[in-house]
Amino acid sequence: MQNLTPTASAMHSLWDVSGGLCQRAWVEIDRTALSHNVRQLRQFLAPHTQLMAVVKADAYGHGAIMVAQTALESGAAGLCVATVEEGIQIREAGIEAPILLLGATNTPEQVRAIAYWQLEPTICTPQQALIFSETLAGVNTSLPVHLKLDTGMSRLGMPWQEATEFAQLVQGLRHLKIASIYSHLATADSLDPTVMNQQHQRFEVAISQLNTAGIIPPRLHLANSAATLADPKLHYDLVRVGLALYGLYPAEHLQDVIHLKPVMQVKARVTQVKTIPAGTGVSYGYKFIAKKQMRLAVVGIGYADGIPRLLSNKMTVLIRGQKVQQIGAITMDQLMLDVSEIPDLQTGEVITLIGKDGDVEISADDWANSLGTISWEILCSFKHRLPRVAV
Ligand SMILES: *Cc1c(COP(=O)(O)O)cnc(C)c1O
């Protein structure tokens, strides 16, 4: 960014650029980093193991269509979403890859939409299987369905001990064709593999009982990002990878397995700069009082954009490759910075809230650590008010 002279014409040219960059704040999506991550993951997997890109929740806030297209171009075999609506959004964009619906669907309306849009549902109970079969009666299709077993997550899925009866029932239903059997791990990111190994063991037992009963599921899968990085024994026929696609590691001890690059950056512009005297209160509630005269910058991003208000007075941002402290309560649309160290800072300059500037970096993990949460939640928290800009 050159020419930051605060004249009217310079201001005009600074803001008058195409796409999201004329915004006060935006989310940048690095498609090169995304395809790098997909290729790293592909290389790490055995050739017969497929990579399913998990793009639920608008691709963890990155933008589902852009991510789906890039992931598929870079070697992903299919997509996973949580809801019917998410699947339809991807189909409406013209994407024809397989879409596995991870969430539960129970109504005839959902079943009809699933069949119409060629989504592949997860079936977790006999009742659900019957609703699918009955709703599809009279339709001349056979819908690929994925049976989910609960091996210890205690979320969706048929108890693993009942896998054989469940699969037999679904096999006997018209219009349904078992495409895979799968389960989900509760503690794959833990340093202690005990629970993960127990779930793996239960999955193996369930599958061998199915095989004994003469049911050979076409495909098996168990791994999320953490399990994918933790142990190739858990890969089976496909892995369902979310977080790692976006360049974050599910746990510190899994960081050395492959090299990932963060895909998302969050940026905003300085909207005003001023000097305040010692003793001046900043923002609602005066949660910050200037101890000495200081330079203050206002930035056009706030909690309505997804910056957690709990980070007030606790976060730093990057300007010109330097870390700068945020001060006072974060407000709905704006926040303030102590920029005393950058006295010539100009209105219109870009600050980085998450991402890299020069040699310094602030990651979603840093925010998650200060807030006592996980990076998954941070990625999903940026609102649609922030345009997603591909770079
Ligand atoms: C969200 C989800 C995943 C992806 O998890 P990550 O930890 O982000 O890789 C995989 N499987 C299921 C069933 C999920 O709900």
Image (cartoon, rainbow, N blue to C red):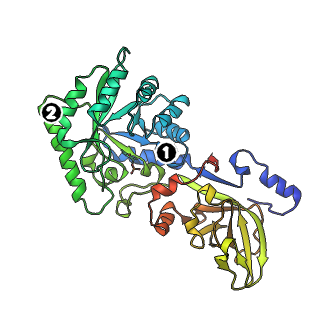
Is 338 situated left or right of 3 in this image? left
Q: Position of residue 144 (x, y in %)?
A: 34, 27
Quarter of the image containing the N terminus?
A: bottom right
Residue 244 to residue 53: above or below:
below
Q: Residue at the location (70% across, 81% down)? A: 290
Question: Which amino acid type corresponds to the residue marked 1 in the rendered image?
Answer: Ala
Question: Which amino acid type corresponds to the residue marked 2 in the rendered image?
Answer: Asn
Q: Residue at the location (18% across, 43% down)? A: 204
Is 138 situated left or right of 293 in this image? left
Q: How many marks?
A: 2
**Residue in front for this viewpoint, 273 or 121:** 121
Q: Nearer the viewer, mark 2 or mark 1?
A: 1
Q: Quadrant of residue 76?
A: top left
Alpha carbons under labels 2 and 1: distance apart: 35 Å
Which of the labelled discs sits on residue 211, or is there none? 2
Cβ–Cβ below 8 Å for labels 2 and 1?
no
- Farthest residue to the left: give it: 212
Q: Position of residue 200 (x, y in %)?
A: 22, 49
Residue 45 to residue 308: above or below:
above
Is 54 situated left or right of 197 in this image? right
Residue indicated by mark 1: 57
